[in-house]
Amino acid sequence: MKKSQSKSAESSSKPIDEGIDIPGDWRGKLLSRLRALITEAKPEMTEERKWRKPSNPAGVPTWSHNGLICTGETYQNVVKMTFARGASLADPSGLFNSSIEGNTRRAIDFCEGDEPDEEALKALIRAAVALNTTSARGESSRQVRETLSASTDRMAARSARLRAAIEVAERRGVPTRLGAKKGSPLAA
């Protein structure tokens, strides 16, 4: 006798629009905006609602690509966007402001009136996708973190060298793009 799928397996993930229970106030608008940014950052992202329970019958909106990327939840005073492997991500814009003490996840709490830094958020989402993709190829989290850290260090060193070169050039009176006047051939 063949067993059917369990009830929990059937209801463990639902399309995000199905049974949607988003508040009609600022939280719902912000969650919809974050959803749009996530899909702009990575159109191939899988959207689902998972972890349904009596206290949250609609489930939690999740976005995945080679594994869980992030979740979006509404609470009374915040909209929380939690990155499953956020501790392994570089956050040069300082977006993470919640759950920063843990070893795995990181979150961003948006309060009423907060404006998300759209470009920084999309970059963070793309970095999370890249992390999942490299991990899917068999690299360990430590290897990925070291690679990302080395890349960030190289970019910071290059930026410092460029700033130093520009300062030297400006002291010598050599025009640079940063110091170029409008209309000059060096102006971008």
Image (tube, rainbow, N blue to C red):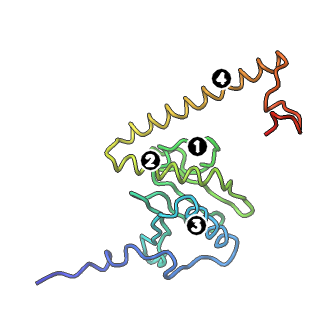
Sequence-first tag of 2 and 3: 3
Q: Amino acid at mark 1?
A: Asp
- Is 11 situated above or below 121? below
The one nearer the camera, 93 or 55, is: 93
Q: Which residue is mark 4?
A: 161
Q: CA distance from mark 2 to mark 1?
A: 13 Å
Q: CA distance from mark 4 to mark 2?
A: 28 Å
Q: Which residue is mark 3?
A: 35
Callout in the foreground (1, 4): 4
The quadrant of the rendering that contains the C terminus is top right
Q: Which residue is mark 1?
A: 91
Q: CA distance from mark 4 to mark 3?
A: 38 Å
Q: Amino acid at mark 4?
A: Arg
The residue sitting at 25% across, 79% down in the picture is: 5
Residue 73 falls left or right of residue 168: left
Classify mark 1: helix, strand or loop. loop
Callout in the foreground (2, 1): 2
Residue 82: percent from left, percent from top: 53, 57
Q: Residues within 10 Å of mark 3 (few under 14, many from 20)?
A: some
